[in-house]
Amino acid sequence: AVESTSKLMCESFMTSTSPSSGGVRECQHCGTLSKDLMQCSGCKAVAYCSKECQKLAWKTHKHSCKEAATKKLESAGKQQQDRMEALAARLQQRNERPVDYGLSGETIWEEACELARSE
């Protein structure tokens, strides 16, 4: 039963993502093919033709759905953390002053003017 459920989920997902399917998906519960199926709001991997089919399939789908949703949240959290770290690094770089070698723009300009006058 588990193997057939996994196979059905895989086939349903492949049907929904196949470029040749023309947007037609298969109901996870009854197998109805349609472009107008409702996608599972938790995992987004399966679709149903009606609320009734979704309710009937929930008992078997809920375990894989919760697992998929948890993985998505963990992945999104990691991506958000990476973006925040990159932003913090950029802000830190902006706030750091460059090393002063005594060559400020004004000093260089004054030296250039002095050289020009002496020539």
Image: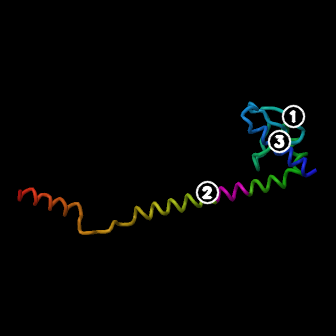
Looking at this view, name the residue that lies furthest to the right. 1
Q: Are marks 1 and 3 in contact (CB under 8 Å)?
A: no
Q: Which residue is tagged 3? A: 11
First reached walking from the N terminus: tag 2 or tag 3: 3
Q: Which residue is tagged 1? A: 32
Helix, strand or loop for the magenta stretch, by majority: helix
Numbered badge on residue 14: none
Q: Which residue is tagged 2? A: 79
Badge 1 amino acid: Thr
Circle nearer the viewer, 1 or 3: 3
Dot 3: within a 10 Å radius of its alpha carbon, few (fewer than 14), some, or many (20 or more) residues?
A: some
First reached walking from the N terminus: tag 1 or tag 2: 1
Q: What is the CA distance from the residue labelled 2 to the residue labelled 3? A: 29 Å
Q: Are marks 2 and 3 in contact (CB under 8 Å)?
A: no
Badge 3 amino acid: Glu
- Residue occupying the point 86% across, 44% down: 8
Instruction: Judge from the rendering whether residue 16 lies leftward or rightward of residue 83; answer left or right.
Output: right
Badge 2 amino acid: Gln
First reached walking from the N terminus: tag 1 or tag 3: 3
What residue range appears in magenta?
71-77
User: Circle 3 — which element?
Assistant: helix
- Return the x and y of residue 16 as percentages of the image width and height: 77, 38
Tell me, yes or no, whether the highlighted magenta stretch contains residue 5. Answer: no
User: Circle 2 — which element?
Assistant: helix
- Return the x and y of residue 74 as percentages of the image width and height: 69, 59
